[in-house]
Amino acid sequence: MMGRKPGRLETKAAGLLAGAASRYYLRKPDLRELLEVKFPTLDAVARAAMNEIWFRARRETGWKLTSVNLEITNHCNLYCTICPVNTTMRRGKGFMDPALFRKVIDENRDFDFALTFQWGEPLLHPEVFELVRYAADRGVRPMLTSNGTRLDPDRRRALLQCGLERITFSVDGDRETHERIRGYSWDRLREDVIRLREERDRAGARLRIDVSMVVDEATEAALDRYLADWKGLADRVQAIPKFTPKERTTPCRELWRGAAVVLWDGRVTICCADSEGAAVVGNAWEAPLQEIWNGPEMREFRRAHRERRFPRICAFCGEFDSPRVSKRFS
């Protein structure tokens, strides 16, 4: 079963493979921790390797869908300058019907994990903790990304009790850049994360707490301060490059990687970069994700990449250039 808890020796072996893959194959050693999070078992490593082989072979299908991003809402209570949700997003806002969430989980209990996030703030969903528990009880490892603005005592307690495996808080550099970009107190976020960690440790809960920073021209100079501020407090401190318009010249792994993105209304799109739902390949209300992921629309996207006739949404999809952080989609 994909959702099982691996033993210590298996975790160590999977970690060694992740380290070797990140350093010697991908040549991106800073991605090791990310690979360890996504692929903690030898079975998961094997499935990821098979999807990579299918990518290298430029197949029109992927080997196997192994995870899902479930956008339980695209509503958000912040107006971050680097995010399209409350700045440029044109598609409608809403909350995922719990019945759809349950349908996806029930049809895919062999998934490695489910990220209950895509765009928006998932803690705004009125049933977020029930949805996370539903996935956890069915062996699908639930993860969540949050802006950290709703960490009152009741929600902190719920986060520790709902079966959530990992929560990632978005932090944009140091205090000055974070507050300029997000309009939310860096000090309050840090204090609430400290409280959550203390409560977790007292309760002996399994929840892992991460922070993630988007690196671009506005935040790159604050990277060292960010790393120093959160090291030792968060279980994992991540930095990722911002999506930027840049001409694509090579096929994108994301089409083969094994992840599906389900928007709040059920539409399935090709990857997490598609904030507008411009590249929809199916609807999770109407068909199983495994069928959609290797369906005719998805195969056409893979053919286009293989032949380097990139669709409009992909043709100028790039990431910020920085020697400090590795790109994820190249």
Image (tube, helix red, strand yellow):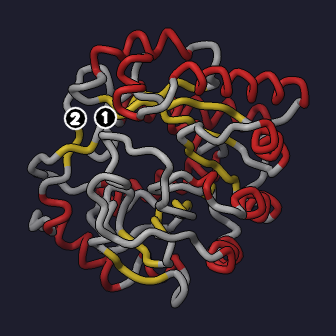
Can you tell which mark lies on residue 320? 2
27 horizontally vs 20: left or right = left
Could you say where residue 203 lies in the image, as x and y percent from the top left? 90, 30
Residue type beneath disc 2: Phe
Residue at 13% of width from left, 65% of height from top?
A: 310
User: Residues at badges 1 and 2 in contact (C-beta under 8 Å)?
Assistant: yes
Give the spatial CA distance, label 1 vs label 2: 5 Å
Q: Please determine whether, in this image, residue 66 is positioned above or below residue 94.
A: above
Can you tell which mark lies on residue 250? none
Residue at 60% of width from left, 24% of height from top?
A: 188
* In front of the other: 108 or 15: 108
- Which quadrant of the figure has residue 41? top right
Could you say where residue 35 lies in the image, as x and y percent from the top left? 51, 39
Could you say where residue 217 lies in the image, as x and y percent from the top left? 21, 26
- Quadrant of the snapshot with the N terminus: bottom right
Q: Secondary structure at mark 2?
A: loop
* Circle 2 Cα neighbour tier, 10 Å, few/some/many (<14 / 14–19 / ≥20): some
Residue type beneath disc 1: Pro
- Quadrant of the snapshot with the C terminus: top left
- Which quadrant of the figure has residue 293? bottom left
92 horizontally vs 220: left or right = right
Q: Earlier in the sequence, mark 1 or mark 2?
A: 1
Residue 171 seen anywhere in this rendered image of the structure: yes
Determine which residue is flagged by label 1.
Answer: 241
Residue 54 seen anywhere in this rendered image of the structure: no
* In front of the other: 18 or 193: 193
Residue at 9% of width from left, 50% of height from top?
A: 247
